[in-house]
Amino acid sequence: MTYLVTNAPEVLRLLVQHMTIVFGGLILSIIVGVPIGVLISRVRVLELPVMTAAGLLYITPSLALFAALIPITGLGKTTAIAAQVVYSLLVITRNTVTGLRSVPAPEQEAARGLGLSGLQRLWMVEIPSALPIIVGGIRVAAVMGVGIASIAAYVGAGGLGSLVFRGIATVDGSLILAGVVPITALALSVDYSLRFIEVRLGR
């Protein structure tokens, strides 16, 4: 903990880098994953191939994925964010599909009875009803993203993971703790915040 106290400005700078990777990747994951989930909920024949592809990407080891992305995105934050999007797609897409399919039939029938179009039903009835489940998937993706951003220091993305890797390389426990403690605090904060939103939406 000594390093964490005496080098607070550096740790804060790395924390900002870490959060940039996490939330940058999360926003892109939502922009990509939610529309794919909406599409799958409408066109069921796409579910098997899309979810299978997302599942295969999800189980790819992180270092192998980084190695595959480097020739395309290079070293740095872009690769880290791309990796987070890849890993988040499965959970966000799956929860979006599950949430939309869990909308009660009476609500959908009432919306049709009011003369709402398909797009209106989606925005005014289905997505609001599915939001708690969708946010649940986003919460899992966000917490997972904190860990992915830590490993991404290996490819020059910066962030708190760089302290952990430096500590391992130099066998310096204070450096490792200086990275692990804020990473854990960030993961817990993100999880609690999104869990709070998820519960509120459920009510």
Image (cartoon, rainbow, N blue to C red):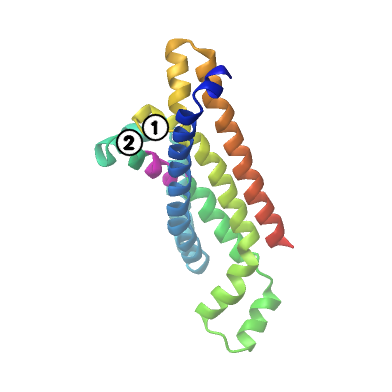
Residue beneath disc 2: 76
> Is the residue marked by circle 2 packed among few (<14), some (14-19), or many (20+) residues within 10 Å?
some
Amino acid type of disc 2? Gly
Q: Where residue 39 appears, x then y in whole percent?
A: 46, 65
Q: Is residue 45 above or below residue 115?
A: above
Label 2 element class: loop
Residue visible at 46% across and 37% down in the picture = 18
Specify the quadrant that holds the N terminus: top right
Residue visible at 31% across and 35% down in the picture = 68
Q: Is residue 37 above or below residue 167?
A: below
Q: Does any portion of residue 56 appear in the rendered image? A: no
Label 1 element class: loop
Q: Could you tell which of marks 2 and 1 lies nearer the N-terminus? A: 2
Determine which quarter of the picture holds residue 124. bottom right
Numbered badge on residue 158: 1
Amino acid type of disc 1? Gly
Magenta segment main secondary structure:
helix
Q: Which residues are magenta?
A: 80-87
CB within 8 Å, label 2 to label 1: yes
Confirm whether the magenta stretch covers residue 82.
yes
Residue visible at 56% across and 51% down in the picture = 138
CA–CA distance between discs 2 and 1? 7 Å
Query: Would residue 177 be found to the left or right of residue 155 on screen?
Result: right
Query: Would residue 11 be found to the left or right of residue 66 on screen?
Result: right
Residue visible at 61% across and 84% down in the picture = 112
Q: Residue furthest top?
A: 171
Q: How many marks?
A: 2
Q: Is residue 21 above or below residue 98?
A: above
Determine which quarter of the picture holds residue 61. top left
Numbered badge on residue 42: none
Q: Where residue 116 appears, x then y in whole percent?
A: 56, 85
